[in-house]
Amino acid sequence: MKDIIEIAIQAGMRILEVYNDTYNIYQKADLSPLTLADQLSHEYIKSELCKLSAVIPVLSEEGDTIPFEERKNWSTFWMIDPLDGTKEFIKKNDEFTVNIALIKESRPVMGVIYAPALDILYFAEKNKGAFKIMCGGTSGDRKSTLINSSSSFGKKVLISKSHLSKATLDYVDLLQGKEGEIEFASIGSSLKFCMIAEGSAQYYPRLAPTMEWDTAAGQIIVEEANGQVLEYETGKPLVYNKEILINPSFICSIS
């Protein structure tokens, strides 16, 4: 885990070098923003993960498309989003992250989320709990704090700043009718999972498309903090390495 934490932090440093200077924005085929920082982070993370283990494949939001015929035989692999929250990056609101997850048998078993501009990192490993690090200083100075979603109080619902759908708003209306008075908050990227995990909010409904690399690291962090990330229709946990890498609608919440 220490190696993965350090990789995430160093990738974040590369993002900050671009973030704190002028940067070039390119365009993907789907017209979502792609930045130089995204590419630098991807290349660094993939290179370092391959050094740790050449036999564990890497599936990255910024990497080459890997056919399902090849992926379907993967029992263990890394899933990364080298820069989650590119819209937040462009808006200069600091709410972007580096996400790294280890997937085994279709479920995340390890995850790291690092917000470089905020210098905050969250991590979890299956059956070992979820933790938060305020990263200032050297690696030897970093102190981790156990987090738990059950420490939450009140009722706060998180909504996406950049991807708010009508279905999500309808769900929030239903929730408000059931739960009574609710406070709303919005934050970018996978930081929403982290807020649920540390008890700063109770619900994060996402009834709009996301990709597997958007949720993998956040899911294990939430689950290890006694929360849950469940498909909206079935109530089952999200699974990974599907033929189509789009997640179904889901609800992230305290248990």
Image: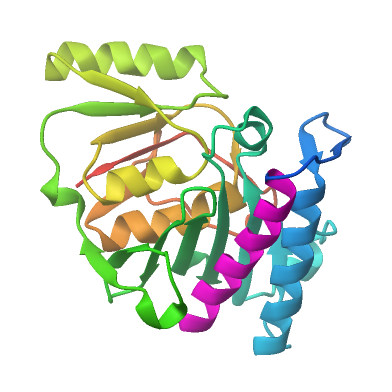
**Residue 85 is drawn in which quadrant?**
top right
Check the picture and name the quadrant holding the N terminus. bottom left
- Measuring from the top left, give residue 35's x and y in whole percent: 79, 43
Q: Residue at x 30, y 65 (%)?
A: 130
188, above or below 167, in the image: below
Q: Is residue 156 magenta?
A: no
Task: Work out whether residue 103 can be spotted.
Answer: yes
174, above or below 33, in the image: above
Q: Residue at x 40, y 13 (%)?
A: 169
Q: Residue at x 40, y 33 (%)?
A: 233
Relative placement, left or right, of 161 versus 180 is: right
Task: Work out whether residue 72 can be spotted.
Answer: no
Camera-nearest residue between 119 and 219 = 119
- Measuring from the top left, give residue 64's x and y in whole percent: 85, 59
Q: Residue at x 82, y 60 (%)?
A: 67
What is the magenta range?
1-19
Camera-nearest residue between 239 and 37 = 37
Q: Is residue 14 magenta?
A: yes
Camera-nearest residue between 84 and 24 = 24
Relative placement, left or right, of 126 versus 65 is: left
